């Protein structure tokens, strides 16, 4: 392996690692970084992936990005979340991610949603129910992102062996 190829592989490996970490931290895009790592070694000729593989994982990335923003909001709205509860969840997710990563994201989303619902005038039980729905949706999306990122990392490593 030539020096420039080694540099590309190291950059790809760092992108893959950042992609997995990004599944837990809201300020990193997660699976798209893993996809970029795959593209990097593909287009530099270090590994070869089929067009079907690249298109499939591109579409999966797009779907995950869309659902990552929609599912928690949909889950919250489906359980009667108010606008304040949804904003509380988003703010809690961001603050929690910085204060106590990676678990702060989950706890922050739950606490933020509950606080937002309490501010909106909902009872404690309604606020907890809505907060829990937001929490479950957030956990589900983290799991989906981790599965996609791990799959891409697997193919990255496999293609180099």
Image (cartoon, rainbow, N blue to C red):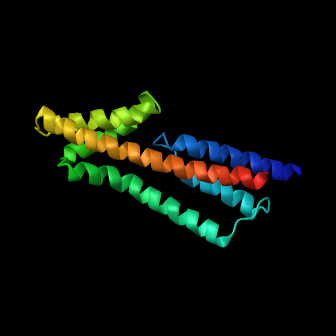
Q: Would residue 8 be found to the left or right of residue 32 on screen?
A: right
Q: Residue at x 34, y 34 (%)?
A: 108
Q: Residue at x 22, y 42 (%)?
A: 130
**Where residue 25 sits: x, y (%)?**
48, 39
Give the vertical position of 122 relative to 40 (above or below): above
Q: Residue at x 32, y 49 (%)?
A: 72
Q: Would residue 13 be found to the left or right of residue 104 on screen?
A: right
**Where residue 146 sits: x, y (%)?**
52, 46
Q: Is residue 95 visible?
A: no
Give the camera-side residue of 132 and 65: 132
In the picture, residue 32 is in which quadrant? bottom right
How many numbered callouts? 0
Q: Residue at x 22, y 53 (%)?
A: 78
Q: Is residue 62 visible?
A: yes
**Where residue 154 sits: x, y (%)?**
66, 50
Query: Which residue appears farthest toward the right when viewing the image?
Result: 2
């Amino acid at each position: 392996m030539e020096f420039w190829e080694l540099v590309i592989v190291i950059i790809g490996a760092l992108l893959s690692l950042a992609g997995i970490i990004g599944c837990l931290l809201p300020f990193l895009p997660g699976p798209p970084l893993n996809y970029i790592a795959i593209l990097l070694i593909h287009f530099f000729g270090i590994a070869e992936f089929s067009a079907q593989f690249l298109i499939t994982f591109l579409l999966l990335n797009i779907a995950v990005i869309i659902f990552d923003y929609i599912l928690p909001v949909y889950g919250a709205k489906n359980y009667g979340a108010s606008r304040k509860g949804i904003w509380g969840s988003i703010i809690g997710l961001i603050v929690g991610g910085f204060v106590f990563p990676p678990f702060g994201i989950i706890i922050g989303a739950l606490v933020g949603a509950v606080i937002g619902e309490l501010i909106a005038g909902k009872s404690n039980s309604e606020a907890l129910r809505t907060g829990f729905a937001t929490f479950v949706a957030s956990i589900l999306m983290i799991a989906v992102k981790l599965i996609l990122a791990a799959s891409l990392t697997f193919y990255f490593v496999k293609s180099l062996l």
